[in-house]
Amino acid sequence: MTVDAKEFKQAMRQCAGAVALVTVGAEHGKRTGLTVTSACSLSDNPPSLIVCVNRNASAHARIREEGAFAINFLHEDHALLALTFSGQKGVDGDDRFAFGQWIRGVTGAPARWRAARSRPRRAFRRARPDRCPRARTPPASRVS
């Protein structure tokens, strides 16, 4: 059985899961981000998250360049923001940050003000080349 890529994406969008924005870029004009459901906890010792970013996503190259990003878990009230960062509203790159309030996180990555939870991360190892950068919270940048 073969599944069309478009049909597969539509089916996956119907699966329930935590929705987060992965944001990257310390400088205005060079920021970008994407909507993911692939962010989840990895370990509590040390506190770690893992997120998978498709190598074809516009944010992938920026994450590799910057070496830091933020994972912003969203509340159900942030549906429009999630759609904006998914590209479904036709808004790209830095223009996505015109929606909502953003602060500069301790890693320099943009963090959503009043997100359900926002965590700065440093990319430190890829599980496979050009796939799934693992993330951890460096001791100096823990957020409570």
Image (tube, rainbow, N blue to C red):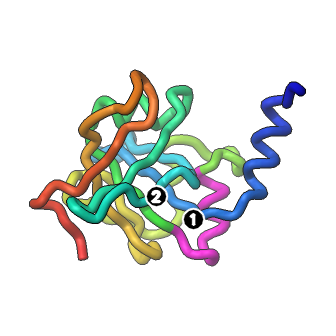
Secondary-structure class at tag 1: loop
Identify the image quadrant of residue 2.
top right
Which residue is found at the position 30% from the left and 30% from the top?
65
Q: Secondary structure at mark 2?
A: strand
Residue found at x 76% / y 41%: 9
Residue farthest toward the top in the current orientation of the protein? 129
CB of mark 1 within 8 Å of CB of mark 2?
yes
- Asked whether 144 falls inside the magenta stretch, the response is no
Q: Nearer the viewer, residue 92 or 73?
A: 73
Going by the numbered disc 1, the residue's amino acid type is Ala
Mark 1–mark 2 Cα distance, whole angstroms, equals: 8 Å
Which comes sooner in the sequence, label 1 or label 2? 1
Point out residue 110 in the picture as x, y percentages from the top left corner: 34, 56
Q: How many dots with numbers? A: 2
In this rendering, is residue 10 above or below 111?
above
Q: Is residue 124 left or right of residue 79?
A: left
Instruction: Write the residue at 61% across / 60% down.
Output: 82
Q: Which residues are magenta?
A: 74-85
Instruction: Judge by depth and name the residue closer to the eye, 32 or 139.
Output: 139
Pointer 1 residue: 18
Identify which residue is drawn at 57% across, 62% down: 19
Which residue appears farthest toward the right when viewing the image?
Answer: 1
Residue identifier under label 2: 40
